Amino acid sequence: MVLIGPNLPHFWKEDQHNKNKSAEAYVIHFSEDFLGKDFFYIPKGKKLKHLLEQSRFGLKFHNEPDSLYIQKIKQIFSAKRI
């Protein structure tokens, strides 16, 4: 899982030599004020603000394919839209 900040070039290429693994990509875009304009000023919001500031350089998280985070992201994409 990666977190890429704004205006950061990025590109992924599937490894053609490893036929045993398949690649999937789920992309979520969100605006800077997606949690409201005051969220980042409360104590819990400051930690997230710091994480998003670090994403300007790109962050890579090492997760297992069946981790809770990956499952939740897949649920977002499989949820019915109203």
Image (tube, rainbow, N blue to C red):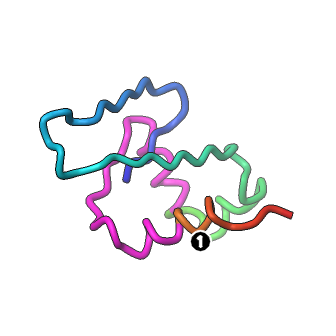
Q: Relative to 77, is 25 above or below?
A: above
The residue drawn where x is 66% and y is 68% is: 42
The residue drawn where x is 53% and y is 63% is: 73
The residue drawn where x is 41% and y is 45% is: 54
Q: Relative to 8, is 57 above or below?
A: below
The residue drawn where x is 55% and y is 55% is: 49
- Residue 19 placement (x, y as % from top left): 18, 44
In the picture, which quadrant includes the C terminus? bottom right
Residue receiving disc 1:
43
The image quadrant of residue 81 is bottom right
- Residue 13 placement (x, y as % from top left): 30, 30
- Residue 28 placement (x, y as % from top left): 59, 48
Q: Which is nearer the eye, 12 or 5?
A: 12
**What count of labels does the image hold?**
1
Q: In the image, which residues are magenta?
A: 48-72
Q: Relative to 58, is 71 above or below?
A: below
Residue type beneath disc 1: Pro
Kindly give the residue lying farthest to the right in the view shown.
82
Q: Which is nearer the eye, 63 or 58?
A: 63
Q: Is residue 37 magenta?
A: no
Q: Which is nearer the eye, 82 or 2?
A: 82
